[in-house]
Image (cartoon, grey):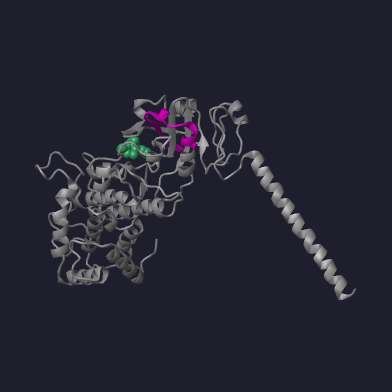
Amino acid sequence: MSSSAKAGIGVVVAILVLSLVGAAFWYKKKRRRATGYHAGFVMPSPASSPQVLGKTNYSAGSPDYKETMSEFSMGNCRFFTYEELHQITNGFAAKNLLGEGGFGSVYKGCLADGREVAVKKLKGGGGQGEREFQAEVEIISRVHHRHLVSLVGYCISEDQRLLVYDFVPNDTLHHHLHGRGMPVLEWSARVKIAAGSARGIAYLHEDCHPRIIHRDIKSSNILLDNNFEAQVADFGLARLAMDAVTHVTTRVMGTFGYLAPEYASSGKLTERSDVFSFGVVLLELITGRKPVDASKPLGDESLVEWARPLLTEAIETGNVGELIDSRLDKNFNEAEMFRMIEAAAACIRHSASRRPRMSQVVRVLDSLADVDLSNGIQPGKSEMFNVANTAEIRLFQRMAFGSQDFTTDFTQSSWDSRSRDIDASGSRPL
Ligand SMILES: Nc1ncnc2c1ncn2[C@@H]1O[C@H](COP(=O)(O)OP(=O)(O)O)[C@@H](O)[C@H]1O
Ligand SMILES: [Mg+2]
């Protein structure tokens, strides 16, 4: 066969293969559309046809119900009937109540396949349209991270709105820090919780599209598993509670004691208001105090205001004595404590633009575990900030802040250079 004939056959074969691939692609796309298996915002109306959203096939009650299932993709999120959630929570029984918060009550339940869930019955759920609620659930259901509580599904029934989350077994950080009769939360667990929850929030702020501002970061929204790994709960709830028409919040949400000043005074909301609230959580971890404690002397009720001068003193002089949780006794690593103090001070800055981004906080907190600045000193085995340790920390600060003046102003650029320095010293990037 001549070479031109060979080339001709080659071209014909290539065209045939290409058209076959094209046809297969077109057919697959069409089939997806027909079954509703679509990644966009085309959603069914659960009110008219309860369907399982996603491929996860949990048992869903009656056989009739099962017949109406279709492969509607919504992350891994499914639709529940009100009856089903009523049943698995023993009729939203008081004994199943896990807690009550600003957005609603949370009940424990167990799905037919044995999966334990927390069912959140939203207050005044009828305020938001069904479609808007679904759109928000859609966004939240796509968020998967080991430090964020997973949404299992949801329910819309008349004016009821319910969300179903994975159950997290070891209660909240608030309970472990402030619960009556609780044993002291070990320092190593505190470090792990700080780093884990920071990662979860950083993911919401910087890796989600659209980005998610939590708006209610607080120790009771940080759930813990049995290894004290943190999972941040309730993200996106504020979105779900939004005004459906304008998509503008009509009231400042969040929790007293955690609110960033600019958000509390003008409703101006950015990721940095979450950073402020996270700084308050760090202060809780450091001091063991509640964000607002009416039993404290007048003027000292607010943790942030009480801590501000002590943070400055700690950073200037290395004297952390009054600041730290006395229940820790000497069982903590000074270098880690100092770094957490620095992170807290930066997060609660008045000026939102001068607070670090969450990913920067993550890098600093991560380095607690990765970079040993303790000079081999065991927790509790040294005097507070002995000479060698102090010298090393000072060196680190000069490196990080690029100037001697690190006491009152943690500028953005100083945080940036600090992150680079930490990266250069071998810590994990986010
Ligand atoms: N996914 C979950 N797993 C286990 N417990 C949960 C879960 N979600 C919420 N809870 C519990 O229910 C309580 C109330 O939740 P919430 O309504 O969010 O109130 P809060 O204002 O305390 O965050 C939480 O503090 C926690 O104890
Ligand atoms: Mg909560």
Quadrant (top left/top right/bottom left/bottom right) for the C terminus: bottom left
For residue 104, what is the image quadrant? top left
Please state the extent of the stretch shown in magenta in the rendering: 114-134
Above or below 85: residue 173: below
For residue 323, what is the image quadrant? bottom left
Q: Position of residue 199 (x, y in %)?
A: 37, 54
Q: Nearer the viewer, residue 48 or 396?
A: 48
Q: Residue furthest left?
A: 297
Q: Residue furthest right?
A: 1
Q: Quadrant of ligand 1?
A: top left
For residue 183, what is the image quadrant? top left
- Is residue 150 visible in this depiction of the protein? yes
Q: Position of residue 14 (x, y in %)?
A: 78, 63
Residue at horizontal 46 percent and vertical 26 percent from the top: 87
Q: Nearer the viewer, residue 380 or 258?
A: 258
Residue at horizontal 32 percent and vertical 46 percent from the top: 269
- Is residue 383 visible in this depiction of the protein? no
Residue at horizontal 57 percent and vertical 45 percent from the top: 39
Quadrant (top left/top right/bottom left/bottom right) for the N terminus: bottom right
Q: Position of residue 90 (x, y in %)?
A: 42, 25
